[in-house]
Image (tube, rainbow, N blue to C red):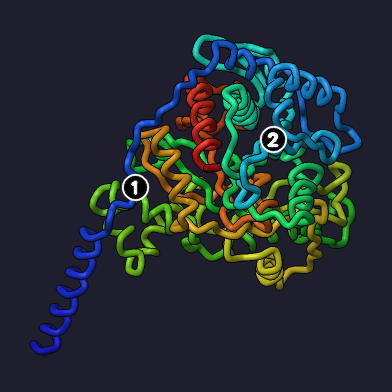
Amino acid sequence: MKKFLGLVVGMIVILVGIILVKTYSVPDIQPAAEAVESSHQPLDSAAEHLAQAISFATISHHPAMMDTETFDHFHNWLGKTYPTVFSTLEVDTFGTHSLLLKWNGKSANQPILFMAHQDVVPIDQNANWEYPAFGDLVQGDYIYGRGALDDKGALISIFEAMEALAKNKFIPEHDVYFAFGQDEEIGGKNGAQLIAQHFEKLGLRFRLVLDEGGIISEGIIPGLEQSVALIGTAEKGYISLDVETHFEGGHSSMPQDTNAITLAADVINALRNHPFESRLCGSMEGFLEYLGPHFSFTTRMAAANRWAFEGVIINAYSAKPSGAALVHTTCTPTITRAGIKDNVIPMRALVTFNSRILPGETEETVIAHYEKALSGLPVKITVHDDFSENPSPISDHKAPEFLEFANVVKRNYPDCLIAPYLVLGATDGRYMTDVSDHVYRFLPFRFKGDDLARLHGVNERVSVNDFENAIVFYMDAISSLSN
């Protein structure tokens, strides 16, 4: 017995030793900060330019409902505001208003692509905006309005950077492309998808693609006070399904225990009781590799020894909805339809579910999960065919292209840590994974906790300082990544 206990103690000591060695030997792989050298100072008019761009209500709608006149006016404004861009670069149009600009370099090999989108989501007419949503307004230190963050802030930052570089007679070593879609907010079918198909026909392969997605997190990541520049290396997929129940109807004065609505409730409970498996995908592995050494000891130990503590890490993430979404495919009811009158028991009920798919799973595996979870219930499952998307491939955070881009971010934002990240929403960048192995998603704006609600919400705004810094960032990114 003593020998057995001694063996157990010895194994525990060895295990603890391995864990401690790995904890203290994990290297800090953060890029070294370099001072960015830029003679460019954003023009005093830059903030006004963004405010003016916001005043064009380029709202996403079904193509048949698209306000083409507003997009026409916006394009006219772009041409007048950035004349050197439009006289220097080649310009093509896809769909009706999606723009593709090409800056011819000294070589057509290894081109790079920058992306943003022109369209914005609608506003709730009943919402109480502090300032008009399309008001052409710079108020104090902020530029207000729909699109300030998503995505006209990035769009106009890129145009300001292009205009400044073009005026300075900049010629890239390699071709640089810029894709500005018209319908990202409703799926990108008439914008980024058409442009990606054009690239495929030309046989183009991009060394690097940059779109929106990750942000600069300020105090949002638990356990880290330092700002973190989150570079999206993948994004989740998207699928919606209708689950329909049928049962005998009748008069509410003589109800049965079961009806279509109670079956719909059973459907919701069954899916709640059978969640998707939680795990760390490659993007989140990279997140922990980059940030692990900067957490407190216990978190650092878990990050360095994921082979032993992955379950603990997943449980910690799962404690909050924002964290849980990073480690599993979500499943949530979003629409219910049933009943025609208060005293009539309906014969039919329908619940719409939306799932955001974790990399490593597919639309097919998600459908199979729904079918298995609901196998004991009399239901009909129908997949929405208007829009569904598998998760994007994961761009390697150990690739030279990622490290090169991370260095650009670090020298422009030297106070920030860098980390790969999984983008929860859909971006136009997903269409470019067939023409590049290195699609990165980063929006160079600083977000505090309450700023996240401004995306697609009320009082959307970006600080003038953030916007001006973004112009310098894009100037550096365009000039250095293309050379």
N-term-proximal mark, 1 vs 2 = 1
Question: Who's the residue at 53% across and 26% down the image?
Answer: 471
Q: Secondary structure at mark 1?
A: loop
Task: Examine the rendered structure and indicate whether residue 127 appears above or below residue 401.
Answer: above
Q: Is residue 177 left or right of residue 309?
A: right
Q: Secondary structure at mark 2?
A: strand
* Residue type beneath disc 1: Gln
Q: Is residue 1 visible?
A: yes
Spot occupied by residue 60 in the image (x, y as percentages of width and height): 78, 33
Q: Looking at the image, which is closer to me, 272 or 217? A: 217
Mark 1 highlights which residue? 30
Spot occupied by residue 12 in the image (x, y as percentages of width and height): 18, 75
* Residue type beneath disc 2: His
Crowd tier of the residue under label 1, counting other residues whose Cα lies within 10 Å: few below 14, some 14–19, many 20 or above: some
Q: Is residue 457 visible?
A: no
Question: Who's the residue at 48% across and 51% down the image?
Answer: 402
Task: Examine the rendered structure and indicate whether residue 208 appears above or below residue 226.
Answer: below
